[in-house]
Image (tube, helix red, strand yellow):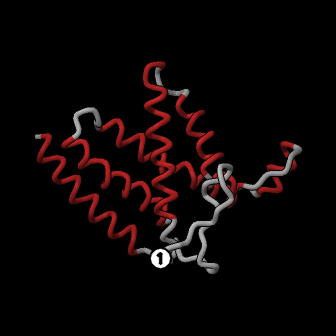
Amino acid sequence: MPDLLTHVLGAYVLLTPVTWHVEWVDRRHVAVLMIGTIVPDLSKLQLLVGSSAVSDAIGRPWLWTGLHRLGPAGTLAAVGALGFERGRRLSGFGWLLAGILLHLVFDLAVIRASGLAPPYLYPLSWWHPPAADLLLSSDVWPWMMSSVLAGVVWMFDRRLVD
């Protein structure tokens, strides 16, 4: 799952420098954003538990791919926000949702046979945005590049904190 690591490290690389310059953004927000980037990939649980097994268990039709869309993933973000203390729930939901959106934007770069990405905005829209067709989700170079960038950002972050 190299793309999962790329999403998480990409969130770290993008938001950590913001914490250096924007006073109200701190390290906790970076962690919550990183967690948010994981939410759409919960659809990969289908590798462990098939959709038909879940359908049989709940007595309703079920597809794991729905979790890789804005609506269901946003619902999970809302549920996750309940884990924050009362005064921080809206902020927590916002950062989780931002992580989900970042994940979906990163996924626009994946090569698609049709040249179109899935309808990530469901249930707001069935629109299939154009895919950038830059990489395969199994390519190793994106996570290698994001690992190097994360290492550089981490070193700068440590120097600024100390």
What residue sits 42% from the left and 62% below the top?
Answer: 6
Residue 43 is situated, as x and y percent measured from the top left of the image, at 64, 55
Q: Residue at x 38, y 75 (%)?
A: 141
Position of residue 135 relative to residue 153, above or below, is below
Q: Secondary structure at mark 1?
A: loop
In which quadrant will I find the C terminus?
A: top left
List the single residue furthest toward the top: 86
Q: Which residue is mark 1?
A: 135
Image-based side of 28 in relation to 98, left or right: left
- Left or right of 65 in this view: 19: left
119 w.r.t. 56: above or below: below
Q: Residue at x 43, y 25 (%)?
A: 88
Q: Residues within 10 Å of mark 1 (few under 14, many from 20)?
A: some
Given the image, on which type of amino acid does mark 1 rest? Leu
**Nearer to me, 150 or 112:** 112
- Residue 100 x %, y %: 51, 49
**Above or below, comparing residue 131 to residue 11 in the picture:** below
The x, y position of residue 36, in whole percent, is: 48, 45
Q: How many marks?
A: 1
Position of 112 compared to 7: left or right? Answer: right
**Residue 123 position within the rendered picture, expressed as x and y whole percent measured from the top left:** 68, 49
Residue at screen point 25% across, 59% down: 151
Q: Nearer the viewer, residue 53 or 132?
A: 132
The furthest residue to the bottom: 113
